[in-house]
Image (spheres, rainbow, N blue to C red):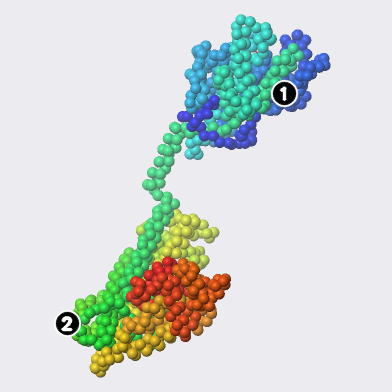
Amino acid sequence: MTVVAPSTPASKIERAHVSTPGGTKVKEEKIVVTVRLRPLSKRELLARDHVAWECIDDHTIVYKPQLPDRSAQQASFTFDQVFGPSSLTEFVYEEGVKKVALSALMGINATIFAYGQTSSGKTYTMRGITEKAVNDIYEHIVNTPERDFRIKISGLEIYNENVRDLLSSESSRNLKLLDDPEKGTVVEKLVEETASDDQHLRRLINICESQRQVGETALNDTSSRSHQIIRLTIESTLRESSGCVKSFVASLNFVDLAGSERASQTHTDGARLREGCHINLSLMTLTTVIRKLSIGKRSGHIPYRDSKLTRILQHSLGGNARTAIICTLSPASSHVEQSRNTLFFATRAKEVTNNAQVNMVVSDKQLVRHLQKEVARLEAELKTPDPSREKDLKIQQMEVEIQELRHARDELQRKLEEVQKGSNVSESPHTVKKCLTYSGALSAPLGGKELMVGNKAGNAMERHTIRQSSTAPFALMSEIRKLEHLQEQLGEEANRALEVLQKEVACHRLGNQDAAETIAKLQEEIREMRSVKTSTREIDGGLVIAPNKSVSANLKDEITRLHSQGSTIANLEEQLENVQRSIDKLVMSLPCNFQQIDTEGTPKVKSHSKKKKLLPLASSNSANRQNLIRSPCSPLSTARQVVESDTENTAPENDAIVNDEITPEQDKKTPGKSEDGGDTPSKDGTPPCHRRSSSVNMKKMQKMFQNAAEENVRSIRAYVTELKERVAKLHYQKQLLVTQVLELEANEAAGHNIEEEEEDGMPCSGRISFRDQRQQIIELWDVCHISIIHRTQFYLLFKGEEADQIYMEVELRRLTWLQRHLAEIGNASPAPSGDEPTISLTSSLRALRREREFLAKRLTIRLSPEERDALYMKWDVPLEGKQRRMQFVNKLWTDPHDAKHVQESAEIVASLVGFSESSNVSKEMFELNFAAPTDKRPWIMGWASPISNLLHL
Ligand SMILES: Nc1ncnc2c1ncn2[C@@H]1O[C@H](COP(=O)(O)OP(=O)(O)OP(=O)(O)O)[C@@H](O)[C@H]1O
């Protein structure tokens, strides 16, 4: 136990301000000073002394001399309370010191002094006050059953500057004062008795008083010759059931000082004179301390240590205590001077400020007891988990599942990205579809790697065609293999999902005949799909183009193989669709079984539309569905939870179902849910929070799961769309290749010599076609407000080489589509649908304006002032004009019909963005792009990252 020494600033004691029984909030407060004027004593009456003082009201005492007093001495004194000769001690206690005394019950140290000359009534008053305080303390204890109180008592006197224990049998022994670093000044070996009850306490107090030094003086037959301090230490703790380990602890000092008179007045000599000297030394120090404290902070050093009295009572004098001083006065005119001194002392004491605080201690014993209890409680909780704990575990489990879902999604995304990277063609799926609607054969869309084949025959056309046609099958085959690989994975994943579904059905004995049949059908479909895959693999075995075979023989082989591949792809796609449909059907048939089990364990069947709403899985693939099955949003997951908790007759966990998916009617019917929306125990007494949590956290979790599931569904949809589009694209590429090979065959058959047509490395027909196409493209760029950086790069890179043809055709088709699209929507800004870019005239113009602003900034970076001025002059931009950079940039790429203008515009833009034909930028970097441009950074749309690097974007 941390010992609380009232006189010490114990470091383990916590302090806080609280309301006391008196009702006031404890803060800095002045010492309460009251004056009690006793009646004339017998001795004074006999001596025909006169009453010289009168209490004219509750606060003021005035000097009333018999003869007019012409001295300039103060005659009126005001205090917190003054009590006249007729005031009973009870009244003095109630009005003067009760609040202070009872502070100790609330953990606030309190001290009550009686100060005055000998025979003025100090002992008389303090005895009465102590008695009343003890009464009140025990009354409070009785009225406060929630707290345990312990009262200890110690008593000491300071006689001739010696400290004596008033409760010790060896009371004559002088006790030492010790300075404890934690407790401050302590009296060594001072006996402290615990009072068992109020009577016991009274007896102990009586012992103290009886042990006190008394002697006869001229003024008092039983004069107290020492300073007496009776200290009650009151500790209170809330009873054990509260679990509180903090206690209040405070001391209450009753201090009856020795008389403050001068020795001459008491006509003392010998022992009494010596006593008087010592008494006065202590009182003089007390007076000095009070005087200095009354001045406040300016007072400097406070000489507490100059006397034992002030050392022991240090905390009561300007420290952590509430203090009340009762100054007792004799009314006799013969003691006017002493009375006046007492009133001066009282006046100074009024100015002293204390800082009383609540002392709270933590008992080591109590703390250990409390911790033991806490450990026991936790152990019990672990053994029999309460519902709230189970809920926490469930939340943790759900968090793990969310994490898994995220991983699955990321993995899927990564796979998609890998596939996209692996592809030679980067395109937006929806645009592929649009491009595929164009009729007519295009050249092979694959530039890049050349394959040197054995046939060195060499007309240019054949060379070019061989280069394209022999490269394309490889790329195409690579695409097909990737697709097949993906589809194989898909089949495996679908199979795994099916196994899970099958287990679910078997576990719950809920599967109906339909479900079992559907599963069987699905497995059959997957088997079929795999057999198709195997045959595809066999074809793949002969994919290597034999180097010693003729080109045309190779190509024919390719065509044959590709034809078969085409049907394989179609088959695979069809199988994929079948599997998806079957899985959707199966999954849609299952959730109601698990979600709507009534209390008899009979599955309730929901309408299909409702099920569809519950499970947004229509276009998900099986791999993701498998993840979704494990997710807390999944009805299968719900079903599993039901089984795992082995509560067949209990309402299923509804937390996993998004709230807005349940109609109010259904909600009402949910077992365990009371009419007022509160949870009620189910029939088997399962706690309601097993089934439904009303906590904010659960709602948050539900929302999170919903979002996660929706996000997954979006990714899955994109994944499936991507697969389909890749199949479509392969068809398209195959078509191009086949057409080209057929043309080649026709040329070969006709013995057509292309070489004759060659001029400057470019066929005449090709050259004418290129020029026409390029002009068309330039005009379309202008009409469609295409990025001028894009125009520049395209214009400078593609100059009519054979390999450029495919790029020209693709660009032309892209622009033609775009022109038509813009004509259709005009200036309207279509609402974005899904991930599709929204293109409108407005968005294109806005993008173009942003690009021109960018180029205007580049003007100052890339060109010197002289170069800029030269350009301004050449392009008719006023040299002094405002915003001349913007004026100049606005003139670039504005006349599609002026070849010189186009050429110069391209050169200027190229120099501004740091693009040159001889730089590392090559056509291969600009993968063919079938996508329509968007208004997001259009100048890098359709171009690979090197351009954006050049632009430092
Ligand atoms: N208010 C009072 N009403 C009636 N009698 C009183 C009152 N105050 C004191 N007396 C009486 O006056 C006498 C002296 O009182 P008391 O012993 O309390 O004085 P004291 O200040 O303690 O003196 P000392 O310092 O010498 O001990 C006692 O006989 C006491 O009964």
Q: Quadrant of the C terminus?
A: bottom left
Amino acid at dot 1: Phe
Mark 1 vs mark 2, foreground winner is 2
Name the residue rendered at 59%, 23% in the picture. 302
Q: Is residue 26 above or below residue 265?
A: below
Q: Which residue is mark 1?
A: 83
To which quarter of the image does residue 95 belong? Answer: top right
Q: Position of residue 794 (x, y in %)?
A: 40, 78
Residue at the far left in the pictured view: 548
Name the residue rendered at 52%, 82% in the picture. 826
Depth check, front residue: 181 or 112: 181
SS label for mark 1: strand
Q: Position of residue 893 (x, y in %)?
A: 47, 79
To which quarter of the image does residue 715 belong? Answer: bottom left
Q: Which residue is mark 2?
A: 548
To which quarter of the image does residue 950 belong? Answer: bottom left
Depth check, front residue: 807 or 520: 807
Name the residue rendered at 70%, 21% in the picture. 344
Q: Position of residue 125 (x, y in %)?
A: 66, 20
Q: Are marks 1 and 2 in contact (CB under 8 Å)?
A: no
- In the rendered structure, the answer to whether residue 558 lies left or right of residue 675 reads left
SS label for mark 2: loop
Name the residue rendered at 34%, 65% in the picture. 411
